[in-house]
Image (cartoon, rainbow, N blue to C red):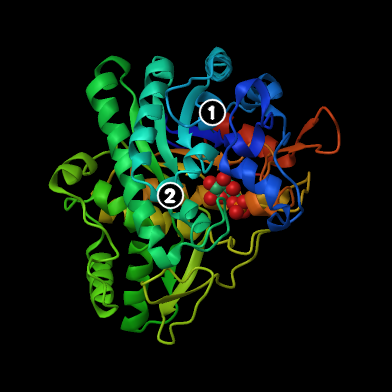
């Protein structure tokens, strides 16, 4: 079967900080990425910031029209927490923020597109960072209040929700320093504490939806997880075990508490970290414990599995305890990015089969949940005839189709990262992921469809992968 199932959704994903601009307009509060780009431009590869970016804040109607023209059926975007709650808490609500997102959602619906909302895509209100950010357990409640407000205000119109985007990546901002808030708190075991708070915040928001909104609004809520599809470097048992550890210390770290029967971190993580903590003379394990009540709330807090997939990586047993960019603390693994063909980002290789393998792994590990690929795509340096992007999307989509047809995985949708060339975090505007280019030198930020946009249109119209050679 060449065709995707009838109910399968094709969409695009964006995120507020990367495209909106209008960083201080209409009462929006400062967030951690505003702060980082304004104070540490040396950390951004081209020294830029996202104060204007694509100016999507003012141009969203034009962009939603493009989504419609490309026949995409779903559009996933994120809400800027500090545009709604400038201080992060619900004591002060910025009405202009609510009006804005209502307009965006109405425009999406008017164009017969399904709106999908992410509540948190890395852009924490600065005021909440000032009280410790995600290290502070109070943020569980602040997030839950914010989520509740969003469900209440937009839940009649929005039926697809995700709480957090890639929590394993946002932790880099606290230990490996690739993201805001650019702190180095590894020695305080901040990574494990943050993950703990994020899982609890997700589950709390999910249960609020269950109790107060689900029966009326009939929506779905999930959390977006990611991780490389790991391949063992050799056939040795040591490297095969390293592969398991690498998967469990990344995707499993967040997925296991939510999707497994145990409702706790993966067994291999628990065992290894508890032992290491003891050996390090700590009074308690570095990996915190959930209470029984928390486990009840966390276990099963999903309606589908939201997966961002980009690449595979090669993993081996870390005998020498060498430090690499992706060592994964306490996992004793050594990660290399593999010598598959490159994309603009050093960590993202052209390894299409990996998406099928990862989908199958999730199917087997978590009892066959519905899986939505919420991000997939590749970066280049800005080619309007982006043949490489087409090849990337095409070959990854072929593997998604195999996962559905040959491996009977329940894949329900696929979104491309991303619609517009955008601010790509510490790479600034250097790397382009859009199927639509933006002229960042012109005041009106003119949009131009790339060749990949025509590929996407044909994909959506025929519901099968275009056969043309690119
Ligand atoms: C995903 C993020 C996106 C986007 C993309 C490209 O992990 O969810 O926000 O940025 O990666 O990543 P990068 O900019 O690091 O190349």
Q: Is residue 277 left or right of residue 308?
A: left
Q: Quadrant of the N terminus?
A: top left
Q: Looking at the image, which residue is at 34% across and 47% down? A: 197
Percent across and percent down for residue 181 are 55, 51
Mark 1: few/some/many CA within 10 Å (<14, 14-19, 20+): many
Pointer 2: what residue?
167
Rate crowding at label 2 as few (under 14), some (14 to 19) or many (20 or more) other CA atoms within 10 Å. many
SS state under label 1: loop
Seen in the image, is 285 located left or right of residue 462?
left
Q: Secondary structure at mark 2?
A: helix
Q: Do tag 2 and tag 1 residues touch (Cβ < 8 Å)?
A: no
Any part of residue 338 in sight: yes
Q: Residue furthest right?
A: 442
- The residue drawn where x is 27% and y is 22% is 214
Looking at the picture, how far across and down is residue 167, in whole percent? 43, 49
Q: Nearer the viewer, residue 125 or 347?
A: 125
The residue that label 1 is drawn on is: 86
At 72% from the left and 44% from the top, the residue drawn is 49
Position of residue 193 relative to residue 49, above or below, is below
Please tell me how many numbered marks the rendered image carries: 2
Judging depth in this view, the residue of 451 and 93 nearest the camera is 93
x and y percent of residue 139 in the render?
38, 40
- From mark 2 to mark 1, how far is it between C-alphas? 22 Å
Q: Residue furthest left?
A: 292
Report whether residue 371 is seen.
no
- Residue 280 in the image: state x and y as whole percent: 29, 78
Q: Nearer the viewer, mark 2 or mark 1?
A: 1
Q: Earlier in the sequence, mark 2 or mark 1?
A: 1
Judge from the rendering whether residue 377 lies leftward or rightward of residue 54; answer left or right: left
* Residue at the image position 53 percent from the left and 21 percent from the top: 113
């Amino acid at each position: 079967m060449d065709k995707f199932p009838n109910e399968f959704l094709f969409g695009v994903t964006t995120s507020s900080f990367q495209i909106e601009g209008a960083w201080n307009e209409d009462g929006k509060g400062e967030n951690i990425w505003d702060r980082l780009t304004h104070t540490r431009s040396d950390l951004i590869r081209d020294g830029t910031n996202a104060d204007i970016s694509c100016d999507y804040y003012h141009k969203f109607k034009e962009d939603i029209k493009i989504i419609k023209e490309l026949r995409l059926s779903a559009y996933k975007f994120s809400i800027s927490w500090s545009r709604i709650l400038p201080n992060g808490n619900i004591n002060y609500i910025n009405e202009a923020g609510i009006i804005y997102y209502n307009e965006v959602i109405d425009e999406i619906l008017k164009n017969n597109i399904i709106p999908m909302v992410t509540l948190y895509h890395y852009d924490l209100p600065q005021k909440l960072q000032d009280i410790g950010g995600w290290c502070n357990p109070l943020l569980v409640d602040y997030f839950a209040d914010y989520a509740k407000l969003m469900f209440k205000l937009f839940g009649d119109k929005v039926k697809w929700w995700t709480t957090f985007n890639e929590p394993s990546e946002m932790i880099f901002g606290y230990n490996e320093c690739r993201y805001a808030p650019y702190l180095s708190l590894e020695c305080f075991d901040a990574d494990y504490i943050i993950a703990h708070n994020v899982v609890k915040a997700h589950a709390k928001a999910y249960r609020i939806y269950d109790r107060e909104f689900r029966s009326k609004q009939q929506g779905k809520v999930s959390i977006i997880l990611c991780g490389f599809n790991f391949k063992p470097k050799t056939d040795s048992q040591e490297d095969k075990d390293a592969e398991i550890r690498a998967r469990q210390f990344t995707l499993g770290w967040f997925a296991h508490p939510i999707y497994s029967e145990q409702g706790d971190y993966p067994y291999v993580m628990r065992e290894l970290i508890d032992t290491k903590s003891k050996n390090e003379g700590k009074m308690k394990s570095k990996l915190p414990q959930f209470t029984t009540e928390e486990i009840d709330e966390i276990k099963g807090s999903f309606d589908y599995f939201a997966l961002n997939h980009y690449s595979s990586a090669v993993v081996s047993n870390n005998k020498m305890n060498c430090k690499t960019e992706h060592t994964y603390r306490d996992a004793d693994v050594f990660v290399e990015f593999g010598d598959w063909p490159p994309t603009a980002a050093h960590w993202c290789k052209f390894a299409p089969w990996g998406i099928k393998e990862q989908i199958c792994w999730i199917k087997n590990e978590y009892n066959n949940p519905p899986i939505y690929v919420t991000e997939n795509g590749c970066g280049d340096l800005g080619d309007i005839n982006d043949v490489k992007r087409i090849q990337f999307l095409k070959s990854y989509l072929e593997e998604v189709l195999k996962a559905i047809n040959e491996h009977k995985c329940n894949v329900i949708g696929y979104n491309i990262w991303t619609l517009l060339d955008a601010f790509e975090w510490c790479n600034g505007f250097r790397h382009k992921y859009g199927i639509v280019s933006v002229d960042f030198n012109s005041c009106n930020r003119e949009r131009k469809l790339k060749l990949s946009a025509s590929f996407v249109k044909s994909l959506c119209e025929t519901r099968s992968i275009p056969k043309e050679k690119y």
